[in-house]
Amino acid sequence: MKYFMLNYGCQMNESDTEHYAGQLVEMGYTAEDDFHHADIIIINTCCVRESAEKRISGKIGKLKAVKAKNPDLVICVAGCMAQKDGEKLLKKHPQIDIILGTAYVNSFKSILTNYLKERRGAAYTDLTLHQGEFEGKMVRKSTFSAWIPIMYGCNNFCSYCIVPYVRGRERSRGEENILSEIKAAVKKGYSEFTLLGQNVNSYGKDTGSGAFSNLLRKADAIEGVERIRYMTSHPRDMGEDVVRAVAECGKVCENFHLPFQAGSNEILRRMNRGYTREKYLELVAMIREIVPSAAITTDIIVGFPGEAEKDFLDTLDLMKKVGFDAAFTFAYSRRSGTPAAVMEGQVPPDIKKARLHELMAVQNEESLKRNKMLIGQTVEVLAEGPGRKDDMWCGRTRTNKLVFWPVKDKKYAPGMRVSVKVEKAQTWLVKGTAVESG
Ligand code: SAH
Ligand code: SF4
Ligand code: F3S
């Protein structure tokens, strides 16, 4: 029996997908790359923007013909869109057998087992269900880098965002469970760990299990761990204790992803972000003082309802003042059920597009400038794999910059540490020569 898996959305979804794969393997399934030959297809979905939903709907639509040819095929739609639309999806796409909401990751195996007995389709979307620790098998995609969820859900309710509605309230995992998952993965050869949560800075606040910075320090002390990353941080909750932990913990990478979303205080207020542009700039200054080598990246939304030209100029200005290593820029997408969806002053698509292009042009120039500063330096890279052509390998620096270098006669393996002398810089990557590895 074979499974085909399709994943959309953020790292949390990628992590969930690894849990689904593990449960399927426990049930005797093997992975299959061609969905025409699969006995079960799982689509793990995202609904953060309309564009994601459209793409996924198109994919689900195409599966109708596949199911018609193979009526025994099981189609399971999981994740955030499944959570949001539940029964509606089943009605719209009768080829779907199981709708699996975001609180059912750990129950997938038993739900599927039941389904195979009775062959009765259903939607599981109770979001209040609090699952215990995942104790089953996990099939990780990478052989050296592991996603480690440290908390689920989000309590922030930024006014544009659907995530709190489809992922439920914040639940932190116990520190012991997290640390033992990391230790177990180290034994299997993993060396890079990314701690995941929608707002990692509020880790432990719901359980009283201790601050995020303590968790970083404890993870840092685990033997065999080489690199620790985390995402995402909320600028409102990012404290000096975390910045100091990054500075003092040798394994925690000096890479700060701090989405600022908008540069205008009025827009930030209506986004319900809980900080001002002045506070954000103070935070950046603090980071640069305590961790001078830090790379800072961000997420930005353009065209939030009521965003006037002067608000957009504030965003551009903040972007120029900070000088980000990279920025992920998005056109505001109206998500029904969120407060911003019914706000006045929805911005026309062509204006959003023009603003997006302007931001990207500024960021591309900045990214190139920052990458050029690496020329002549020797950087520590964790090898990921061959590039598109086999004569180059690629990997990432501690600051998360993508590095390419020619293979020559040396053999590399994913997870290997390589020193690369940077010679050329582009907007999205740098290229160089390996000077040693080990
Ligand atoms: N919890 C994380 C990530 C949330 S989703 C955080 O708070 O940073 C990732 C990014 O998608 C957000 O940072 C935001 O920039 C963007 N995003 C979320 N909702 C959006 C919407 N309705 N339209 C456009 N972009 C959105
Ligand atoms: Fe969405 Fe805001 Fe929560 Fe991030 S912090 S997931 S943007 S509500
Ligand atoms: Fe998308 Fe859900 Fe992640 S909406 S961004 S997959 S939490």
Image (cartoon, helix red, strand yellow):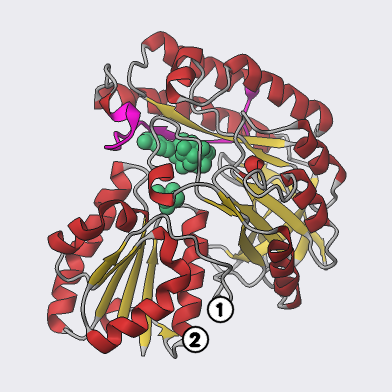
In the rendered view, tell whether residue 225 sits above or below residue 48: below
Residue drawn 38% across and 72% down? 5
- Viewer can see residue 430: no
Q: Amino acid at mark 1?
A: Gly
For ligand 1, the image quadrant comes to top left
Of 187 and 419, nearer the camera is: 187
Q: Position of residue 338 (x, y in %)?
A: 33, 34
328 with respect to 57 (left or right): right
Q: Amino acid at mark 2?
A: Glu
Q: Is mark 2 within 8 Å of ligand 3?
A: no
Q: Quadrant of residue 87?
A: bottom left
The residue where tag 2 is placed is 26
291 with respect to 338 (left or right): right
Q: Which mark is residue 136?
A: 1
In the rendered view, tell whether residue 268 sits above or below residue 3: above
Q: In terms of secondary structure, where does tag 1 sit?
A: loop
- The quarter in which the C terminus is drawn is bottom right
264 with respect to 116 (left or right): right
Give the magenta-colored segment's residue range: 322-341
In the rendered view, tell whether residue 217 sits above or below residue 289: below
199 with respect to 271 (left or right): right
Q: Do the residues bearing badges 2 and 1 touch, measured as CB atoms within 8 Å? A: yes
